[in-house]
Amino acid sequence: MLRFALNRLLQAIPVLLIVISATFLLVHSAPGGPFSADKAVPPEVIKALEAQYNLDQPLWQQYVSYLGDVLRGDFGPSFKYSGRTVNELIAAGLPATAELALYAMLVALVIGISAGVIAAMRPNSMQDYVPMSAAMLGICMPSFLLGPLLVLVFGIHLEWLPVSGWGDIPGDKIMPSITLGTGYAAYIARLSRGGMLEVSISGLYPHRARQRPLRAVNYL
C-alpha cells in the first residue's frame, strides 16, 4: 500500500508541473493585464506596479520565480486585493471551507450508505428502484442547479432555512452541506448497493463467485 501511494505521488508531480505551466502561460497570453482599468492610469504608475509585482522581467524569469515561490508554498501578493497575499486569503477561507467539506462528507456517507443498504435488501423491487432512481437523479443534477432549488423551496417558499450566512444563524449549514454532499451520496449509494450484492452472491453461491467475481457489477 505504501509503495502504491508513493508511486501515485511520483506520478502526480509531472501532472502538477504541466498544470502549473499551462496555467501560467494561459494567464500571460490573455489580453489585458492585472492593472487594466476603465480609467486612464499614468504610464509611470503602471511601470511602478509592474516592478513591484516582478512583471517587468522577461517571461522565462517570471516563470522561474513563480515556480520557485510555488514550491516554497508562497503564492505571492494578490492582484485584486491590495496589501494582501494569496496565502492570507486562502488561510482566511480555509476554516469555513474545511467545515463545509466535513459536513458535506457526513451527508454523503449517511445518505449514500443508507440508500445503498435499503436498495440491496430487496433488489429489483420498488425498494431498490426508488433509491437508485434518486441516486441517478443526484448524479445527473449539478450542484449549481440543486443549490438554487433548495433555496427557492426551503428558504423562500417554506422559510424553514436561512438563505445566507455561515455560523451566525441556526441551520445555515444545512442547505450548503446537502448541496455539496448529494452528488457524492449518489455515487456512494450505488457503490454500497453493488458491494452488498457482491457479498450476498459470494455467500449464497461461492462457486459462482469464484468463477465470475464481477457478476454483481452488472446490477449497477
Image: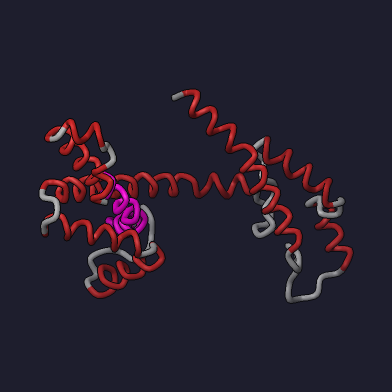
Q: Position of residue 60 (x, y in %)?
A: 83, 48
In the rendered image, residue 175 lying in the magenta stretch gets the answer: yes
Q: Position of residue 204 (x, y in %)?
A: 12, 35
84 lies left or right of 98? right
Instruction: Please name the colour scheme applied to the rendered image.
Output: secondary structure
Q: Position of residue 111 (x, y in %)?
A: 23, 50
Q: Position of residue 23 (x, y in %)?
A: 67, 53
In the rendered image, residue 157 lying in the magenta stretch gets the answer: no
Relative to 92, is 143 above or below?
Answer: below
Q: Residue at x 62, y 37 (%)?
A: 13
Q: Residue at x 23, y 61 (%)?
A: 133
144 lies left or right of 161? right
Q: Residue at x 23, y 50 (%)?
A: 219
Res. 130 image quadrant: bottom left
* 41 vs 32, nearest the viewer: 32
Relative to 138, is 218 above or below?
Answer: above
Relative to 211, is 43 above or below?
Answer: below
Q: Residue at x 73, y 65 (%)?
A: 30
Q: Give the magenta range.
A: 169-191
Give the residue furthest to the right: 44
Give the residue furthest to the top: 2
Which quarter of the figure is the N terminus placed in?
top left
* 171 vs 71, nearest the viewer: 71
Q: Main secondary structure of the magenta part?
A: helix
* 29 vs 38, nearest the viewer: 29
